[in-house]
């Protein structure tokens, strides 16, 4: 799992764009206590969808 900020950095996206992707269901966000994480599978699936769009 990736911390929210690490996922944003890996995708080179802003906080606003990150939350838009979560709200659209393109990225999953899970909480453990007060911390927020993006599961690795969700991050990989989003990147794969971007690659399909580009093809």
Image (tube, helix red, strand yellow):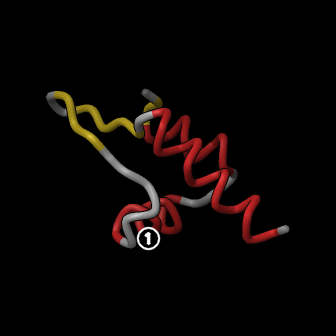
Q: Nearer the viewer, residue 43 or 13?
A: 43
**Residue found 39% across the figure and 72% down from its top:** 24
Mark 1 surroundings within 10 Å by alpha-carbon count, few (fewer than 14), some (14 through 19), many (20 or more): few
Residue furthest to the right: 55
**Residue found 69% across the figure and 52% down from its top:** 12
**Residue found 46% across the figure and 65% down from its top:** 21
- Quickly name the residue at label 1: 20
In x, y percent, where is residue 1? 43, 27
**Residue found 64% across the figure and 60% down from its top:** 49
Q: Which of 42 and 29 is in front in this view?
A: 42
Task: Determine whether the residue tagged by mark 1 lies in a helix, strand or loop.
Answer: helix
The picture quadrant where one finds residue 46 is: bottom right
Residue furthest to the left: 33
In x, y percent, where is residue 30? 27, 40
Q: Can you say whether 35 is above or below 51 in the image?
A: above
All told, the count of numbered labels is 1
Q: Can you say whether 27 is above or below 6 in the image?
A: below
Tell whether 30 sits left or right of 45. Answer: left
Q: Quadrant of the C terminus?
A: bottom right
Q: Can you say whether 14 is above or below 40 in the image?
A: below
In x, y percent, where is residue 47? 65, 51
């Amino acid at each position: 799992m990736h911390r929210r900020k690490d996922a944003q950095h890996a995708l080179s996206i802003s906080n606003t764009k990150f939350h838009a992707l979560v709200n659209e269901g393109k990225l999953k966000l899970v909480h453990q206590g007060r911390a927020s994480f993006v599961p690795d599978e969700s991050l990989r699936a989003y990147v794969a969808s971007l690659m399909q769009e580009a093809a």
